[in-house]
Image (cartoon, helix red, strand yellow):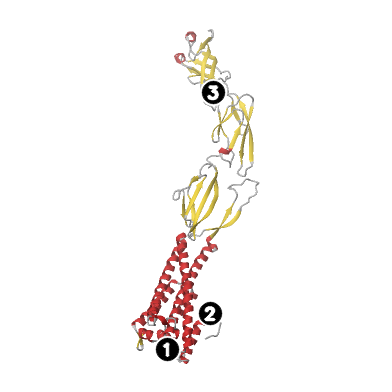
Amino acid sequence: MASGNLSPRQKMINLMYLVFIAMLALNMSKEVLSAFGLLNERLAESNNATEARNAAFMQSLQTKASDQPEQYSDLYTDAQQIDALSEELDTYIAQLKDEMMATVKEDEQQDYEVQDKADFLDQKMFAGDDLSEAGKEFVAKIDAYREGMLALVDNPSIESDIQSKFETQPVERGDGVTLDWLKYHFEGFPLVASRTKLTQLQNDIKTTKSEVLQTMLAGEQASALALSNYNSFMNVSKSAFYSGENFNGEIILGRTDPNTVPKRAELTLDGRKLVQGKDYTFVGGKVQLNVNAGSPGDHKIEGTLYYGEDGDETEVAVSTGFATISMPNAAVISADKMNVVYRGVDNPMTVSIPGIPDNKVNASAPGLSKVSGSNYVMRPGSGRTVTITATGTLPDGKPISTPAEFRIKDIPAPVGAVRGETGIVRMQREGLEKSTISAVLEDFDFDLDLQVTGFSFKVSGQPTVNVSGTRLDGAALSNLRRAKRGETVQIYDIESKIQGSSVKLKRTAPVFIELTN
């Protein structure tokens, strides 16, 4: 019984049985009874310490379940069932011990030498060769505890320990006689010995509870810390790199445990507070963002995630971001020799640098002014060329400057028109009499408001008439009536200008009218 590599607890149990045998052999010597009493005291002290540890454990687990319900709520539920089962049997045994000790005089509670009678349990637990109702209840309580614990435990080693400690099957004595479990352990034993065995049973309950809870928590924490709950992530100093730069990214591990969920978060996007449920949600241990990418450029996400830990909040700083680029909707095709701006008109221009937001790009040149964003207007002055320089700052802080030269061209010469037609126009005499003389810029990219102030009118064989305005006057109409059918009359020296502008236009081309009647 005492051989082999035994734990201190098993050695103590073996010693108890040796003491039992010695008591029978020595006719229950007073010293042995005192030894049982002292052993009971030691077990009681151990039980108090274990109970305090179990209570602290349950309190800590309750806090964890409150801080991280996704990870610990199920575990806490199982722990509560284990606690209830253990408390029920422990309380039952404590009440039985109180009833037993009520048969001992108050002033003899610590006098173990007088606690040598077996009457109380023998009368309460046994009825002849059978068990009494109280005895059957006692065994049923232990059976219920054993089966309830086994249903909650998923660890072969602990299951075997529970089965061994709380087995109530008949026991075979050394002489080959098989006895009921309760008779074998309690019938005929002195009160102090039975009391000590009941205290030992309470110790088994408390230590089993402690082992089960610790093992369950260790398994949960090991699962949470398993590498299967981690993913690799790239940590970079900026969201975009340029050709020729050194890439300084770092590959790191990040927790993706679905049970590790923040209790709350305080986040901002470019200084704007994000709202939970609208801009972000907690999904499977992650903070799922749902925000508009915004205007082109770098965007900063900052703030704090708050995790529950030991009843307090642990802060985890957030400092990350993303870059937004303009979505291409057309190809960029340019004619290398057609960098041209026109003098005398507002030339619309777009100036941008890929990868740099518009508010960090500046363009400068004589006559250039900014409208908004990347939109500018160029009003060239004298000279034949103008250089526009775009400057900006890259995300890494490096400045960039790009010049572009444009040729300056004058507005092309206008062309005279009658009824909007140019060149040689065939029309009836009456139509010309009522028509307005105008000037147009054919195939010009800008829509300018040209105004005619006068012109010269010539009919073959008749003197030239200088007309003021846009219609034939009396002298011009008189000459027109002398023209023959099929004859061509001329309108030339057309004076035209841009409405509201002092820019002087080139000479306007004439228009010829062939009379059809």
Question: Could you tell me if the residues under marks 2 and 3 are in contact, i.e. CB atoms within 8 Å?
Answer: no
Give the percent coordinates (x, y) of residue 488: 52, 14
Residue 192, picture quadrant? bottom left
- Read off the residue under disc 2: 8
Question: Could you tell me if the residues under marks 1 and 2 are in contact, i.e. CB atoms within 8 Å?
Answer: no
Callout 2: 10 Å neighbours few (<14), some, many (20+)? few
Q: Of label 1 and label 2, which has the lower sequence position?
A: 2
Q: Which mark is residue 178?
A: 1
Viewer-closest of 75 and 364: 75
Residue 275 visible in this rendered orientation of the protein: yes
Amino acid under label 2? Pro
- Read off the residue under disc 3: 441
Amino acid under label 1? Thr
Callout 3: 10 Å neighbours few (<14), some, many (20+)? some
Secondary element at image label 1: strand
Residue 212 left/right relative to 141: right
Compared with 472, 327 (above or below) is: below
Viewer-closest of 498 and 513: 498
Give the percent coordinates (x, y) of residue 256: 52, 58
